Image: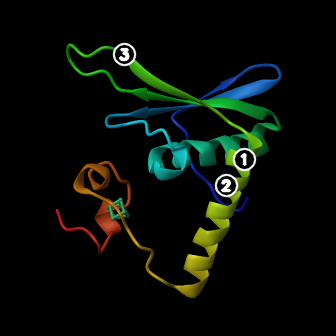
């Protein structure tokens, strides 16, 4: 795929895998296409499929439990439709890089504070 990433955990069974992501902030949306964290986990699923040569059956996004909070998680099946969507996303990101265009950002402070690029990002100044 020509991209790389590090999932928080990958559960490997004989014939399938499950990608696990731990988040401090996560609000599952009905439309997974509108959720960057879900798309990130789906991208990890595609990478893991390539790396382990096994289908990723689902992604599990687990909300890190704070004091007195109940354990919460979100389980999403990985389908061919989602794989194609992620592949197209990666291609569009490659085009942005090739054309050296700044992408539109819908990032909000709660997203930026957990972003590993915050130190390098010229869009945010915290
Ligand atoms: S810090 Fe920059 S790269 Fe990271 S989410 Fe915010 S705007 Fe995006």
Whether tag 2 and tag 3 are in contact, CB under 8 A, the answer is: no
Circle 3 residues within 10 Å: few <14, some 14–19, many ≥20? few
Q: Residue, x 77% and y 45% (percent of image)? A: 50
Q: How is the image coloured?
A: rainbow
Between discs 2 and 3, the one toward the N terminus: 3
Residue 85 disc label: 2
Judge left or right: residue 108 versus residue 75: left
Gap in Å between the C-alphas at discs 2 and 3? 30 Å
Q: Secondary structure at mark 2?
A: helix
53, above or below 103, in the image? above
The correct choice, above or below, for 21 with respect to 15 in the image is below
Nearest to viewer (mark 2 / mark 3) = 2
From the top left corner, tell me how far across and down residue 100 is, in percent.
Answer: 52, 85
Could you say which disc has been placed on residue 81 in the image?
1
Q: Where 122 falls versus 14 (above or below)?
A: below
Q: Relative to 22, is 18 on the left or the right?
A: right
* Residue occupying image coordinates x 25% and y 16%: 69
Give the number of the disc on residue 29.
Answer: none
Q: Which residue is mark 3?
A: 71
Q: Residue furthest left?
A: 126
* Disc 3 CB within 8 Å of nearest ligand 1 atom: no
Q: Are marks 2 and 1 in contact (CB under 8 Å)?
A: yes
């Amino acid at each position: 795929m020509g991209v790389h990433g590090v999932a928080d955990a990958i559960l490997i069974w004989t014939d399938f895998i499950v990608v696990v992501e731990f988040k401090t902030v996560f609000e599952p949306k009905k439309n997974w296409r509108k959720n960057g964290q879900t798309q990130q986990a789906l991208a990890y699923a595609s990478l893991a499929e390539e790396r382990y040569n096994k289908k990723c059956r689902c992604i599990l996004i687990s909300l890190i439990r704070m004091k007195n909070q109940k354990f919460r998680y979100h389980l999403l099946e990985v389908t061919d439709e989602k794989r194609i969507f992620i592949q197209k996303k990666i291609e569009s990101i490659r085009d942005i890089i090739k054309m050296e265009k700044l992408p539109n950002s819908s990032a909000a402070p709660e997203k930026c504070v957990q972003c590993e690029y915050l130190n390098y990002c010229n869009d945010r100044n915290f």
